[in-house]
Image (spheres, rainbow, N blue to C red):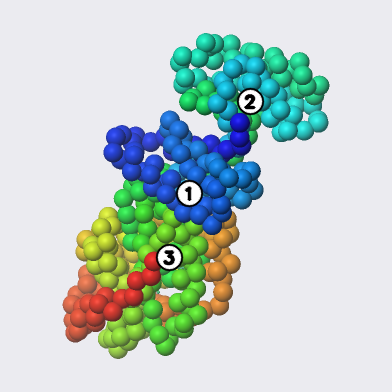
Amino acid sequence: MRNVLLVKYGEIAMRGKNRYLVENRLIRTIIERLEPYEGYRVYKEQGRLLVVNEAFEFDYDLVIPIVTVLPGVTAVCPCVETEDQSIENLRNIALAHCKEHFGTEPVTFKAETKRSNKRYPMTSREVSADIGGYILHNMDNVSVNVHEPDFVVMIELRNNAYIYTKLIPGCGGLPMGTSGKATLLMSGGIDSPVAGYLTARRGVEIEAVYFDSPPYTSERAKQKVIDLAKRLSVYTGGIKLHIVPFTETQLKIYESVPPEKMTIFLKRAMLKAADQIALKNGSQALVTGDSIGQVASQTLHAINAIDSAAENFVVLRPLCTMDKQEIIDVARKIETYEISIRPYEDCCTVFVAKHPETKPKKSIIESMQHKIEGLDELILTALENTEVLEL
Ligand code: ATP
Ligand code: MG
């Protein structure tokens, strides 16, 4: 008998090889996260994962926060595992577990059994009734309520038996790697890390791209993006960050277009470069942190005038309908907010016009773009000099 953690993850239409790959990926991520702590192992257990500690007592306060944040984890249950499935043993374990978790105030409960071990000599109903009755007779502060109990005492009969009363909700969504890959344009602001998190939550693997414009943007600004990517990697289990030197490209645009059009052309150049990175790294989409109307370059007109710069991939904007406050709430929850609000110079604000155009015309923008001599070559050079960090 020992304390373990049962991990439930998204029940998705996964079959054969795909299921196996996704489960293994989730196992690998949990193992990586628990590597610094001695004794932890992860096993598959019939559509669930099982985290155990083979050397020491299980530390739930340590492990639960690490596992619940992973995309695809729908819930975790701290539980007692036992090899001895005799009804006498199950009764005793269930009673001890309830005494530990129910407290001393009056509570209602019901017992529920899942029996995937079909050779077990009693039916699920019989096991539930037996154990429920035993708890009822041996505790003073409990009564049964089958419709809305305070606690459900779960008894799962698998290769071993598992008994638990607590189900802690996880991140939800789909496990990483079930939904392909996307390239995230990530600045040091509040929005793009949230966009990356929400996309990753749908099981999409993320690579991030940051456009760096030294000396107009500082080393601190770059460090901030690195820290944000590291924080995202807590959820995604490792992230690649491409740092693209964009000063020359940005200066070229500055020289070549009227100030009110600067941002549109800069965003187009970023999308064009990110699109090439996405092509090389096997992505199926680009992701930005745009939210409709937040700033001039995020009006629907501007979005239309910008998007055609991505030649190969669709541009996802997971925040497009969210209010700033809603975005901030998520940023706080995922703990990117504190990093994002550190002061820094954004490459978009360095050259920003006082009155940027809010209704640019796509056709005009596109025809102007063709006339900027040498811009494509500068973007190519920037891509060649990109630094890639594995975080
Ligand atoms: P954020 O909070 O993500 O910085 P924002 O509200 O500041 O967004 P903009 O600066 O207009 O808005 O940027 C819109 C989006 O363009 C960002 O969410 C990001 O996806 C992308 N972007 C902007 N600047 C950069 C950059 N230097 N590197 C990579 N992506 C960028
Ligand atoms: Mg920004």
Horizontal relation, residue 127 to residue 20: left or right: right
The residue indicated by pointer 1 is: 30
Q: The N terminus lies in which quarter of the figure?
A: top right
- Callout 3: SS: loop
Residue at 32% from the left image edge and 54% from the top image edge = 181
N-terminal-most mark, 1 or 3: 1
- Rounded to the nearest whole Å, what is the CA distance between mark 1 and mark 2? 26 Å
The residue indicated by pointer 3 is: 391
- Image: 231 above or below 89: below
Foreground: 59 or 205?
59
Foreground: 347 or 235?
235
Residue at 71% from the left image edge and 28% from the top image edge = 96
Horizontal relation, residue 377 to residue 141: left or right: left
Foreground: 245 or 112?
112
Q: The C terminus lies in which quarter of the figure?
A: bottom left
- Callout 1: SS: helix
- Rounded to the nearest whole Å, what is the CA distance between mark 1 and mark 3? 16 Å
Q: In terms of image quadrants, where is residue 173?
A: top left
Q: Amino acid at mark 2?
A: Val
N-terminal-most mark, 2 or 3: 2
Q: Position of residue 321 (x, y in %)?
A: 45, 54
N-terminal-most mark, 1 or 2: 1
Q: Amino acid at mark 3?
A: Leu
The residue indicated by pointer 2 is: 153
Ligand 1, by image quadrant, is bottom left
Foreground: 127 or 203?
127
